[in-house]
Amino acid sequence: GAGVSQSPSNKVTEKGKDVELRCDPISGHTALYWYRQSLGQGLEFLIYFQGNSAPDKSGLPSDRFSAERTGGSVSTLTIQRTQQEDSAVYLCASSRRAGNSANSYEQYFGPGTRLTVT
Amino acid sequence: RKEVEQDPGPFNVPEGATVAFNCTYSNSASQSFFWYRQDCRKEPKLLMSVYSSGNEDGRFTAQLNRASQYISLLIRDSKLSDSATYLCVVTLAGNNRKLIWGLGTSLAVNP
């Protein structure tokens, strides 16, 4: 079946502009995550959506970052007034329905959006 | 202490070698454990979940040691295609939907 898709694959923007990054999770997956990864660094958790529950926004680095998930499926990550330090690969992942088995938490990643702020 | 710690490597091994990585975690109530691999400039991909009894998938064996709070990954008969970064992941106790990621161990398998 189709995996997680993200768009655009690459985005170059000028400092101060707003950007929107899109994620389409695997159909039927109720949990959706956003991460970012700077070159040579580990994954940095940003935000997590689970069904209709309030999202866990604890990883968002500043109030310039926000995310929405409409209809329990597609998600958009918005970065306002971009800064050069926002340059990174933004990764989206989804995992299946809630449950206590280990495979409920297995995350499947999209190919990422490479954001470059000039 | 970091929540999840890994030796960054790099591990350089010849083809056919056996190599093992360890990963330690700080929260004794962590419940689920995984190994992911990440190729250069690619997204992470699930390699295997780690079960309490240990599990094997072909050349890969994962073990969990709750008493010492570590998980391990053993790769037998290394292939060139095994060259990647291996990421250790654990669930955060009390919030099982949020995963904590290690920074990864780099493996280079040489001909």
Image (cartoon, coloured by chain):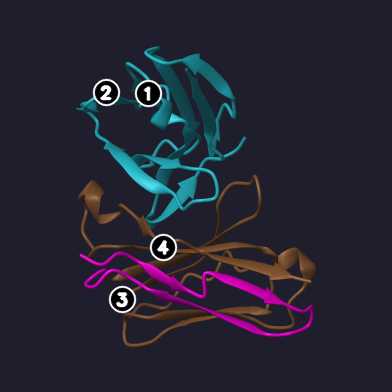
Real-space CA distance between mark 4 and mark 2, rounded to the nearest whole angstrom: 26 Å
Real-space CA distance between mark 1 and mark 3, rounded to the nearest whole angstrom: 40 Å
Real-space CA distance between mark 2 and mark 3, rounded to the nearest whole angstrom: 37 Å
Chain B tint as drawn: cyan
| Amino acid on which disc 4 is placed | Gly
Assign a secondary structure to mark 4.
loop
Real-space CA distance between mark 4 and mark 1, rounded to the nearest whole angstrom: 26 Å
- Judging by the rendered image, the residue that carries numbered circle 4 is A110
Question: As displayed, is residue B68 above or below residue A61?
Answer: above
Earlier in the chain: of badge 4 and badge 3, it is 3
The local crowd at label 2, few if under 14, some if 14 to 19, many if 20 or more residues have their Cα within 10 Å, is few
Real-space CA distance between mark 4 and mark 3, rounded to the nearest whole angstrom: 19 Å
According to the colouring, which chain is brown?
Answer: A
- Judging by the rendered image, the residue that carries numbered circle 1 is B79
Query: Mark 1 near mark 2, Cβ–Cβ under 8 Å?
Result: yes
Residue interval drawn in magenta: A1-29
Label at residue A51: 3
| Amino acid on which disc 3 is placed | Gly
Q: Are marks 4 and 2 on the same chain?
A: no
Q: Are marks 1 and 3 on the same chain?
A: no
Q: Are marks 4 and 3 on the same chain?
A: yes
Looking at the picture, how far across and down is residue A71, in whole percent?
32, 87
Real-space CA distance between mark 1 and mark 2, rounded to the nearest whole angstrom: 10 Å
**Quarter occupied by residue A61:** bottom right
Earlier in the chain: of badge 1 and badge 2, it is 2
In reply to whether residue A6 is colored magenta, the answer given is yes
Q: Residue furthest front?
A: B111
Judge left or right: residue B45 versus residue B5: left
